[in-house]
Image (spheres, rainbow, N blue to C red):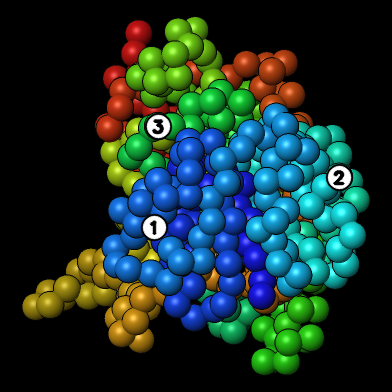
Amino acid sequence: MRTLVFFGATGNLFTRKILPALATFSEEQEFTVVALGRRFKDNASYRAFVAQLLPRPSPLLERLTYVQGDLENPGELALKISPLLGDGPLYFYLATLPSLYRDALHCIEALAQGRNPKDLFVALEKPFGRDERDFLALEESLRNVFPEEHIFYVDHYLGKGTVQNLVVLKAENFFIERLLSREFVQEVHIGVFEEEGVGERGVFYEETGAIKDIFQNHLLQLFTLLAVDIPPLCAEDQKECARFFFQLSRERARLLSQVRLPESHEVQLGQYAGYREEVRHPSSLRETFFFFPLFLDTERWRGVPFYVASGKKTAQKRSFIEVLFHSVVTPPNRLIIEIQPEERIDLVVSVRKPQRELESTPVTLNFTYSGAFQASTPEAYEKILHDFLHHDRTLFPDSSFIQEAWRLTDRLLENLKTHPPAFCRYREGMLTPEILFREKRIPDEMCLG
């Protein structure tokens, strides 16, 4: 039987995102789970904690074994875990702080001794390292234990139905693929906005910041999926689809090498007002917000600004891509790909008002899964866990994309270090995407003096 070993099984990511998906998934699949953490002393107290988090009874509880341990002593932890592992394939999932990945891998190396590498798989959460150099060192460490095709880099945005649908939307609708170019597009907005703050992730955020946490992965994934040239979609043949996604991934990596970064005066960084108290660092300048344009030096997109933004403690939780077309009307025609809170695709066009001559008004042509198919899409982590256990890497970023994303991010951060941009400590719960993308900055009245 397959065994899943989760590092960080008492953390925020595991309990909020992975655990509910794992519980749903356990109703259809056979596996056992070893959960590693420091918070609980024994298996009974951890199971009681998990039972409170699940909305209904689940077979997961009976398959779950908890091990308390510290990654500072990876050899000792491996001795505790080893008796719990069967003879079947092992799936390791790193849902802990990236700074602990090296220690986790030391533990995994001890557990992998004497096992066939064909039976060893690993998934790990972003950010993948601290910079390009650190990522390459991480990748080398991973390949010392796992075959390359058994390494799964997790970006949960790629598990979302609407993000996957963006590929189909472009590949199977030639007129949309044709419209997405400088000939028709005025500018593009890509945003990830959150109502909550850093919460229990204060240590992680002080290590990372918004640019490494969101821009280097989520935003660059969305940016390249929208901007890349996509060939006609593969047929149902699995090998053909694998080649399609491999080619697409390499093209997206190549696209990142053609990005022109913004000048420092085009960048605004920010930090929400209560951040320093939350992380207990009274002089922290760690960014929880960024806004700037990217430009692509390609024939298709030359001159079109892609404005990217992300912020915590904003007025609403929302992630989206908005394409503004050259237009003779105000507001302009738009294509909106909404990722959260509701997965949907809207096309805003102008039509004639009833009982009027030729006076127009904007209307929205809308697609949602619930409306079109009377069904919702699976949660992103259900798709991620399914593909991980079935060895399907098509929706996982490959190492070439991650390396190029880090190379671009490293250049950006070095530029901002040399030429510091405007910095705003902003009031909480006020900033909206509409205000930001209209003003192209946080308005002065929302910044503290």
Q: Are marks 3 and 1 in contact (CB under 8 Å)?
A: no
Q: Secondary structure at mark 2?
A: helix
Q: Which residue is denoted by mark 1 in the rendering?
A: 340
Q: Is residue 43 left or right of residue 92?
A: left
Q: Amino acid at mark 3?
A: Gly
**Figure check: 74 above or below 448:** below
Figure quadrant of residue 252: bottom right
Q: Secondary structure at mark 3?
A: helix
Q: Residue placed at 61% from the left, 30% from the top?
A: 208
| Residue 16 circle label | none
Mark 2 / mark 3, whichever is N-terminal: 2
Q: Which residue is denoted by mark 2 in the rendering?
A: 141
Mark 1 / mark 2, whichever is N-terminal: 2
Q: Which residue is denoted by mark 3 in the rendering?
A: 199
- Closer to viewer: mark 3 or mark 1: 3
Q: Residue placed at 79% from the left, 86% from the top?
A: 239
Q: Are marks 2 and 3 in contact (CB under 8 Å)?
A: no
Q: Residue placed at 58% from the left, 67% from the top?
A: 32
Q: Amino acid at mark 2?
A: Ser
Q: Amino acid at mark 1?
A: Gln
CA gap between label 1 and label 2 equals: 35 Å
**Figure check: 40 above or below 58:** above
Q: Quadrant of the C terminus?
A: top left
